[in-house]
Amino acid sequence: MSARPRTLARVAAVQALYQAEHASQSGETVIDQFVRHRIGDPPGSGGVEEGRLPAADVPLFARIVRTATEQQDTVDGMIVGALPESWPMNRLDPVLRAALRAGGAELWLSDGPPAKVVINEYMDVAHGFFSGDEPRMLNGVLDRLAHLLRPAEFPQAS
C-alpha cells in the first residue's frame, strides 16, 4: 500500500475524520495534526506499521477531510437515506461512519475520479479496518450515494 499515495490519503482521511468526531476537533485541526505528525517521512520516523502514512497524497487527504467536514450535514443526510432503517447513523461503528463520510465527500467532488474507482478504493480501505460485513455495507451505501451524486456515470438501462 505504501506505493499507493491516493489510497494512503483515503486511509488518513478516514482516520482523521474518526479523530475529528471522537475528539470533537475541527477538520482544519486534524488536517494540521496529520500533516505535521503522521504524513510525510521525517528522518527517524516510523512507517505505516507505526501509524504513519509517509507517502499519502496530502492535497487529496486535505480535500477529502475539508469536504467531509464542510458538507457533513448534507453527506450525513444522504448516508442516513441510504442506510437500512434498522441501522441509524449512531449505531454504526465510528470507523465505518468515518469511512462513509470520507467516501461520500469524495463522491461529492464532481472533478474527482470516477465513482466506481472511489467505491473500490474505499472497499480496499474498509478491508484494512474490518473483517466482517462492514465493507459490504460501505459498498452498498457508497453505491447509492454515487447514483445520487453522479447520475451521469450510471446510464439508465433501456
Image: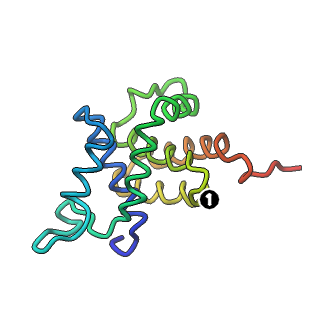
Does residue 122 appear left or right of residue 42 in this picture?
right
- The residue furthest right is 158
On the rendered image, what quadrant is the N terminus found in? Answer: bottom left
Image coordinates of residue 72 in percent, x first then y, are 45, 34
> Of 26 and 119, which appears nearest the observer?
26
Amino acid type for the residue under numbered disc 1: Pro
Disc 1 crowd, CA 10 A, few/some/many (<14, 14-19, 20+): few
Image coordinates of residue 155 in percent, x first then y, are 79, 52
Q: Circle 1 sits in a helix, a strand or a loop, which is it? A: loop
Does residue 10 appear left or right of residue 51 in this picture?
right
Residue drawn at point x = 38 percent, y = 42 percent: 98
Q: Answer with the quarter of the image where residue 42 lies.
A: bottom left
Q: Is residue 20 above or below residue 53?
A: above
Image coordinates of residue 113 in percent, x first then y, are 58, 60
Image coordinates of residue 43 in percent, x first then y, are 13, 74
Q: Is residue 67 above or below residue 52?
A: above
| Mark 1, residue position | 114
Residue drawn at point x = 50 percent, y = 42 percent: 137
Residue drawn at point x = 30 percent, y = 47 percent: 16
Q: Is residue 20 above or below residue 110?
A: above
Does residue 43 appear left or right of residue 113 in this picture?
left
Q: Answer with the quarter of the image where residue 147 lies.
A: top right
